Image (cartoon, coloured by chain):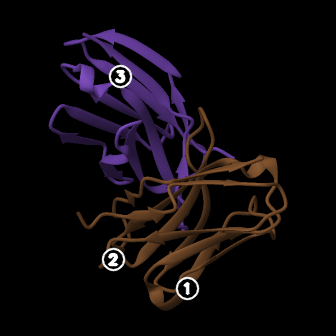
Amino acid sequence: SQQGEEDPQALSIQEGENATMNCSYKTSINNLQWYRQNSGRGLVHLILIRSNEREKHSGRLRVTLDTSKKSSSLLITASRAADTASYFCATDPSGTYKYIFGTGTRLKVLA
Amino acid sequence: DTGVSQNPRHKITKRGQNVTFRCDPISEHNRLYWYRQTLGQGPEFLTYFQNEAQLEKSRLLSDRFSAERPKGSFSTLEIQRTEQGDSAMYLCASSLGGPGGYNEQFFGPGTRLTVL
């Protein structure tokens, strides 16, 4: 079963705009990771945020984590056509190394 | 490039046949994961190894599936008596587990299985 659920399922924006996608999960976690998948490169790790962290930045990416609401958001600023991909969150329920991926957000950035 | 490699990249088989996939992780990585992904879905956890020990196995994994990681290096995933529902992309990932074990996973390109 899928622990995480991304929202929205699909998102279409213009190049230069910001894209925000959300992830909700069900159980307590050790950390949450975001991955990108496109047909050319497969699954690529973007960013990891630990359960005791609230916000993390990496280049044009900003991730927030709210453990009280069991949710996370991924913000991509100044989007580019190359950001077109599916984005997944992955969580490891506490006490396991069994990463559970969400259903993904399909992002399309229009040039 | 010393990333995660998987072989074969594509496999077409007839229902009832056995298939075996191989994954070669990044050499210094001690953790290895197998996932299955179907169209429009996220990767679904199958099993996880820490070195040669299989520590987690999904309850969704039927007895027809078995995985090994001899000597803690490469891993194989075997599916016996394949069914059409086994058609999917099988992904392997590896990571370097340290204290706390919060390391990113590096994924291979996957093996696409089609069961006719």
Which quadrant holds residue A60? top left
- Asked if the residue under mark 2 is in contact with the one under mark 3, i.e. CB atoms within 8 Å, the reply is no
- Specify which label sits upstream in the sequence, 1 or 2: 1
Residue at 43% across, 74% down: B31
- Asked if the residue under mark 2 is in contact with the one under mark 1, i.e. CB atoms within 8 Å, the reply is no
Q: Looking at the picture, how far across and down is residue B81, in whole percent?
A: 83, 65
Asked if marks 1 and 2 fall on the same chain, the answer is: yes
Name the kind of residue labelled 3 in the image.
Thr
Distance in Å between CA atoms under marks 1 and 3? 39 Å
The chain that hosts pointer 2 is B
Residue of label 2 = B99
**Looking at this view, is B21 or A84 the one in front?**
B21
Q: Which mark is residue A20?
A: 3
Which chain has been coloured purple in this picture? A
Residue of label 1 = B53
Q: Chain B colour?
A: brown
Residue at 20% across, 40% down: A57
Examine the rendered structure and indicate whether residue A89 appears above or below residue B81.
Answer: above
The chain that hosts pointer 1 is B
Mark 2 secondary-structure assignment: loop
- Asked if the residue under mark 3 is in contact with the one under mark 1, i.e. CB atoms within 8 Å, the reply is no
Name the kind of residue labelled 1 in the image.
Ala
Disc 2 residue crowd, few under 14, some 14–19, many 20+, Cα 10 Å: few
